[in-house]
Image (cartoon, rainbow, N blue to C red):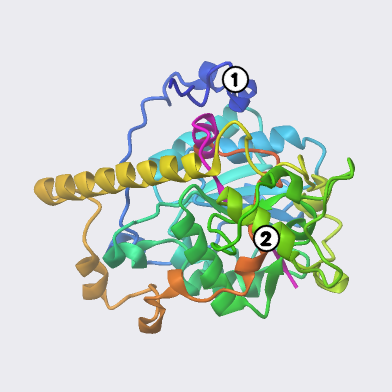
């Protein structure tokens, strides 16, 4: 199939008119994979002069960790032009930061959107600790999966980053995790659960919106019910939630027959999910776009899983090829020994080698079937065109 590029007419980013701004900025080439454990990336980034970066630094901050090419925040601001919010992107590849800030200037968004070159894993606290306003919305979307087990310590979501967000975000702040690699999204979820489970909880969207779980809840169950009918909606479809707030046995069995387990978590305590009146989440009216739809009914769940496995195998091959290329050419991504020699290690503790397979209480809330923000990233744009699943978890700071 033909995948439309990010700035094509069919793309949601087309309205940014970035094609007209590429002269002098479009020929930016960077390596897809970066080793964040290099010495160069271990020095925490100092906070900027916030008054020089934003017109009103007291406004709530929407933070995109790993902002990539930068289109997400530009489109998020375009979709919510009247919000009193500042937007900050953090990215470890400096050429992308430079170009994104040039786009900001050409779009006339100075003082509202800004990008900074940094390693968020080690710099989050030092960089944002002095921000005058509240950090009400954080996005960690499609980070580099670093598939190889020995490279998991390069992943952006590490205990250090989780603890920093726990300390920086106010009650009601919202955090969106998403990836097209379930193993990675589960690892991110588990890391937040293990190191900040007392400070975050899955948002109420997981009990009100369509969710899915990629493995059968009860492999021995057998029924022909449709997965799409497992979700309650205004049309009177069957609800999978029993009186206690748990998924009903019939719903679990029906989901298992489809190869997907529909999981609707119990509603969280209202006091725990009161959002800031100034937050992006509140202003954007986070809601269910399709509360009764799990996946595209034209694509069977098993086929989607097989396709997802194919993507994983392809990305494994790409990762291996890039690693081999880097070793052969002495590429600038560096080696883990760089960080070891410097005595700095922001990676998982030794007892976290099993973080991806830990028994998670949050797993019962499932993955959101729809993007609760409504604004996609570039990666989401590409994955959606291929009909592949995206795994999403929305957390709220309690």
Disc 1 versus disc 2: nearer the observer: 2
Foreground pick, 309 / 29: 309
Specify whether residue 211 is in view: yes
Residue at the spot of label 1: 17
Residue 260: give x, y in percent of width and height. Answer: 59, 52
Residue 182: give x, y in percent of width and height. Answer: 48, 55
Residue 274: give x, y in percent of width and height. Answer: 85, 65
Foreground pick, 281 / 117: 281
200 up-or-down from 23: above or below: below
| Residue 386 sits inside the magenta stretch | yes
Q: Residue furthest bottom?
A: 351
Distance CA(mark 1)–CA(mark 2)? 46 Å
Residue found 15% across the figure and 48% down from its top: 324
Residue at the spot of label 2: 252
Using residue 153 as the reference point, say whether residue 64 is left or right of it: right
Using residue 327 as the reference point, say whether residue 357 is left or right of it: right
Residue found 39% across the figure and 40% down from its top: 95
**Mark 1 packing: few (<14 Cα in 10 Å), some, or many (20+)?**
few
- Tag 2 secondary structure: helix
Which contiguous range is marked in magenta?
380-398
**Mark 2 packing: few (<14 Cα in 10 Å), some, or many (20+)?**
many
Residue found 25% across the figure and 45% down from its top: 317
160 up-or-down from 83: above or below: below
Give the quarter of the image for residue 398.
bottom right
Label disc, if present, on residue 344 of the rendered structure = none
Please identify the quadrant where the N terminus is shown.
Answer: top left
- Tag 1 secondary structure: loop
Residue 141: give x, y in percent of width and height. Answer: 54, 50
Foreground pick, 347 / 286: 286
Residue found 49% across the figure and 31% down from its top: 386
């Amino acid at each position: 199939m033909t995948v439309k590029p990010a700035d094509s007419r069919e793309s949601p980013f087309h309205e940014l008119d970035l094609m007209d701004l590429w002269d002098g900025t479009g020929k930016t080439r960077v390596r897809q994979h970066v080793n964040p454990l290099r010495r160069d990336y271990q020095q925490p980034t100092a906070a900027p002069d916030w008054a020089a970066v934003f017109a009103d630094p007291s406004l709530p901050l929407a933070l995109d960790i790993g902002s990539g090419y930068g289109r997400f925040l530009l489109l998020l601001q375009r979709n919510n032009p009247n919000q009193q919010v500042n937007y900050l992107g953090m990215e470890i590849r400096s050429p992308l930061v430079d170009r994104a800030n040039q786009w900001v200037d050409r779009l006339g968004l100075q003082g509202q959107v800004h990008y900074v070159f940094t390693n968020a894993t080690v710099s989050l606290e030092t960089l944002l600790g002095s921000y005058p306003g509240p950090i009400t919305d954080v996005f960690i979307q499609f980070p580099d999966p670093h598939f190889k087990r020995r490279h998991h310590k390069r992943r952006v979501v590490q205990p250090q980053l989780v603890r920093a967000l726990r300390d920086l975000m106010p009650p009601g702040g919202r955090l969106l995790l998403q990836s097209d690699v379930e193993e990675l999204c589960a690892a991110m979820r588990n890391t937040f659960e293990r190191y900040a489970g007392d400070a975050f909880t899955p948002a109420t969207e997981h009990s009100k919106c369509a969710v899915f779980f990629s493995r059968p809840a009860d492999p021995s169950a057998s029924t022909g019910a449709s997965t799409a009918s497992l979700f309650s909606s205004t049309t009177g479809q069957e609800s999978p939630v029993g009186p206690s707030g748990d998924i009903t046995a019939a719903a679990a069995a029906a989901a298992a027959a489809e190869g997907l387990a529909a999981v609707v978590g119990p509603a969280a305590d209202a006091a725990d999910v009161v959002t800031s009146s100034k937050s992006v989440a509140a202003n954007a009216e986070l809601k269910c776009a399709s509360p009764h739809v799990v996946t595209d009914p034209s694509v069977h769940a098993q086929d989607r899983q097989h396709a997802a496995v194919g993507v994983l195998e392809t990305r494994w091959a790409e990762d291996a090829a890039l690693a081999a290329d880097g070793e052969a050419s002495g590429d600038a991504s560096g080696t883990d020994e760089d960080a070891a020699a410097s005595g700095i290690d922001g990676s998982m503790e030794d007892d976290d080698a099993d973080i991806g397979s830990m028994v998670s209480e949050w797993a019962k809330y499932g993955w959101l079937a729809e993007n609760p923000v409504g604004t996609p990233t570039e990666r989401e744009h590409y994955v959606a065109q291929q009909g592949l699943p995206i795994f999403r978890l929305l957390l709220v700071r309690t």
